[in-house]
Image (cartoon, rainbow, N blue to C red):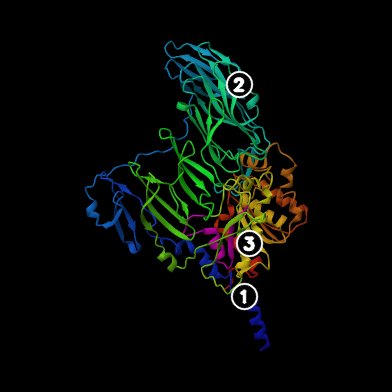
């Protein structure tokens, strides 16, 4: 009797005795994709427009059924009609406004007046008279290691600019494929791969006078140390040549103007930042020749906004956007109407600040028109052929897609066309992730995330918590749009966990101060915010069991962060699985790491390294790496392995032969990751009957 009582008490106390992590849990976890496939209807509206201004679309329904819908935007009517009623209606195509593709690789550049060609021969610029075929070499300083490339003609054909580029370093990474499929013996693979601090290509614009067939000297002081130069542009009168200069280290961004007659360089925009310019995500440059203006994107006031600049003087004519929100993207520039169409984050104070909304605004900053207002994140606007109306779909992780028809003139709602039907999905046992937000490290800033529950979630039970982390500063990473399947977190939760995803400070698309937390500080990974968020969630969710510590997993930058969790916060995180981590930012690709960690390479690189911090390991760590990873040098993981061995630390290692980046997402890797958490957080042997 006493023995039965003891077992009953243990069963009430121990999550492991609730049969979590069993063979049936694994089968259910692995079957989620099939289980939740084809369970959403009325979510996709693909309009066919007609000459009379109406449009139709077909909607798929359960059991293979469908219906056809005819919409009259002017009348504001929506009717289900037989397909026969649509026959004979004259279709109208929506004009494409696709962005231009990549510039073709060229070896010859013709002048606008058709009289000349410029070609590159043996690294130098050669001018060719198209009529006489006579050739004149304009440059003589080109060499194999410092050759001329692209040529940009002035509109009046009097001048040309050629870009001369000195080669950078030639670092190469060598990988060993230990078990090739086509032979017995291993093979090596070598490829170019620049790392932080390496010499980089050095580009300079060179100005030439075509009539005098000579070079016009251009002083380089204002662009002496480029990470890149770009956005090259001749003024319509041919009197000035413009380009952007991004200084290595990304603390200086300039728009420079070169006088075509004298070569004198004048800064039009000269921005200097104490941290970094996010040139990879927040650069927008548009020259307005007819009015001598420049559209420029900047975080100079602490939020990513747009400015109208006078190209002649460099003064700000006016701000175009302002306020505690950020411009995500410029979708359209209407020069004739002097209007911009933008995607923005944080527009509505009561909504999740990561929701994408659409607005239209005039160049002078007036008439900011909300083109969307639904409480969700919005997809692209799809316009009618006459651009009088548009369709837009919005959703949240807990709100199935809603498709609206709106009026382009003022953004007003005409009709709600469809609300997605997820009845089949819910009947299959689907559970929406729970949105949750809490104060971050400063006690003021809201931090947003999700809680994923297993489909057999029991609110009366306790569940260990695992964080699925990706803290790369290039974006925000917690899903915002509706998905039937959030594969990795949902599959892990199904084994008997609550899985959370969080965007901590240091990630993108909030204020500049929020983003700056990452600077020279990637090891931070937003952990002070994440830990506070998880504790806040646990305070209001008694099912969240933090008593045995929190698990954490991620890949690439998430691999770096998940290992860092045990090294820097081993009192909170107890079990980690780290896949293909960029554990030392000196070992990883140059552009990503110099953008956030800065240049030149300083002692902060070593301080932030998981290699130098390996001696601090506590808890259970599984490192996973693919031997053929071309994204992150596998040596980054192996150097952590070496440091852990030198520090006499216990850990686990899985090297997957033949695998590349994301090796843990193989079937075997996913199983081993799941086993690790079941064994060390649930405290049971995986896949028991």
Residue 581 position in % (x across, y down): 64, 50
- The question of residue 480 being in magenta is answered with yes
State the residue at coordinates (59%, 44%). Answer: 631
Q: Earlier in the sequence, mark 1 or mark 2?
A: 1
Q: Which residues are magenta?
A: 479-504
Residue 424 position in % (x across, y down): 40, 65
In the image, residue 210 above or below residue 405: above
Circle 2: is it few (<14), some (14-19), or many (20+) Cα within 10 Å?
A: some
Q: Which mark is residue 534?
A: 3
Left/right placement of residue 296 relative to residue 94 reads: right
Residue closer to the observer: 643 or 540: 540
Depth-wise, is mark 1 or mark 3 nearer the camera?
A: 3
Residue on which disc 1 sits: 17
Circle 1: is it few (<14), some (14-19), or many (20+) Cα within 10 Å?
A: some
Instruction: Evaluate if marks 3 and 2 touch, with contact meaning CB atoms under 8 Å apart.
Output: no
Circle 3: is it few (<14), some (14-19), or many (20+) Cα within 10 Å?
A: many
Q: Secondary structure at mark 2?
A: loop
Q: Earlier in the sequence, mark 3 or mark 2?
A: 2
Mark 1 vs mark 2, CA separation in Å: 73 Å
Residue 177 visible in image:
no
Q: Secondary structure at mark 1?
A: helix
- The question of residue 263 being in magenta is answered with no
In the image, residue 252 above or below residue 324: above
Residue 67 position in % (x across, y down): 30, 58
Q: Earlier in the sequence, mark 1 or mark 3?
A: 1
Mark 1 vs mark 3, CA separation in Å: 25 Å
Depth-wise, is mark 3 or mark 2 nearer the camera?
A: 3
Left/right placement of residue 608 relative to residue 503 reads: right
In the image, residue 480 above or below residue 235: below
Residue on which disc 2 sits: 143
Left/right placement of residue 622 relative to residue 382 reads: right
Residue 214 position in % (x across, y down): 56, 13
């Amino acid at each position: 009797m006493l023995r039965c009582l003891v077992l009953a008490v243990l069963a009430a106390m121990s999550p492991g005795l609730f049969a979590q992590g069993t063979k049936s849990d694994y089968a259910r976890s692995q079957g989620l994709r099939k289980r939740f496939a084809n369970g959403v209807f009325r979510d996709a509206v693909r309009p066919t427009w007609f000459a009379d201004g109406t449009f139709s679309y077909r909607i798929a329904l359960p059991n293979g059924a469908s219906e056809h819908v005819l919409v009259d935007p002017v009348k504001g009517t929506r009717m289900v009609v037989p397909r026969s009623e649509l026959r004979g209606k004259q279709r109208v195509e929506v004009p494409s406004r696709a962005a231009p593709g990549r510039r073709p690789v060229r070896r010859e550049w013709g002048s606008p007046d058709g009289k000349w060609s410029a070609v590159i021969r043996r690294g130098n610029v050669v001018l060719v008279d198209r009529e006489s075929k006579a050739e004149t070499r304009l440059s003589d300083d080109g060499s194999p290691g410092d050759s001329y490339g692209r040529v940009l003609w002035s509109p009046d054909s009097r001048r040309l600019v050629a870009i001369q580029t000195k080669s950078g370093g030639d670092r190469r990474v060598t990988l060993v494929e230990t078990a090739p499929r086509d032979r017995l013996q291993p093979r090596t693979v070598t490829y170019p791969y620049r790392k932080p601090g390496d010499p980089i290509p050095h580009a300079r614009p060179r100005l030439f006078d075509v009539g005098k067939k000579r070079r016009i000297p251009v002083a380089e002081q204002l662009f002496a140390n480029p990470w890149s130069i770009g956005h090259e542009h001749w003024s319509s009168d041919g009197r000035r040549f413009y380009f952007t200069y991004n200084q290595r280290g990304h603390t200086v961004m300039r728009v420079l103007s070169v006088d075509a007659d004298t070569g004198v360089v004048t800064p039009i925009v000269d921005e200097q930042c104490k941290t970094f310019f996010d040139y990879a995500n927040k650069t927008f440059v548009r020259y307005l020749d007819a009015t001598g203006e420049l559209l420029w994107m900047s975080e100079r006031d602490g939020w990513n906004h747009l400015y109208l600049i006078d190209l002649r003087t460099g003064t700000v004519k006016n701000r175009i956007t302002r306020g505690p929100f950020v411009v995500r993207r410029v979708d359209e520039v209407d020069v004739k109407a002097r209007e911009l169409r933008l995607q923005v984050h944080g527009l509505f104070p009561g909504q999740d600040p990561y929701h994408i909304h659409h607005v239209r605004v005039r160049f002078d900053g007036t008439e900011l028109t909300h083109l969307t207002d639904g409480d969700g994140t919005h997809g692209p606007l799809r316009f009618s052929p006459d651009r009088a109306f548009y369709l837009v779909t919005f959703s949240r992780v807990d709100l199935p897609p809603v498709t609206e028809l709106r009026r382009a003139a003022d953004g007003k709602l005409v009709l709600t066309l469809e609300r997605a039907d997820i009845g089949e999905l819910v009947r299959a046992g689907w559970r929406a992730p729970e949105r949750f937000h809490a104060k971050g490290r400063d006690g003021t800033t809201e931090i947003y995330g999700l809680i994923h529950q297993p489909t057999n979630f029991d609110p009366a039970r306790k569940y260990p918590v695992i964080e699925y982390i990706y803290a790369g500063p290039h974006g925000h990473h917690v899903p915002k749009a509706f998905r039937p399947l959030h594969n990795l977190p949902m599959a892990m939760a199904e084994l008997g966990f609550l899985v959370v995803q969080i965007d901590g400070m240091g990630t993108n698309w909030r204020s500049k101060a929020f983003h700056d937390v990452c600077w020279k500080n990637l090891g931070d990974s937003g952990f002070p915010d994440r830990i506070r968020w998880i504790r806040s969630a646990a305070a209001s969710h008694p099912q969240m069991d933090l008593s045995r510590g929190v698990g954490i997993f991620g890949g690439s930058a998430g691999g770096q962060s998940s290992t860092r969790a045990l090294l820097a916060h081993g009192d909170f995180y107890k079990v980690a699985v780290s896949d293909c981590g960029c554990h030392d930012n000196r070992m990883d690709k140059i552009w990503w790491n110099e953008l956030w960690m800065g240049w030149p390479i300083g002692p902060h690189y070593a301080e932030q390294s998981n290699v130098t911090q390996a001696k601090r390991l506590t808890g259970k760590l599984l490192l996973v790496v693919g031997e053929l990873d071309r994204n992150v040098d596998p040596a980054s993981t192996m150097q952590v392995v070496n440091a852990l061995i030198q520090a006499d630390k216990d850990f686990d290692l899985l090297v997957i032969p033949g695998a590349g980046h994301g090796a843990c997402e193989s079937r075997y890797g996913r199983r081993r990751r799941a086993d690790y958490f079941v064994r060390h957080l649930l405290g049971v042997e995986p896949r028991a009957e």
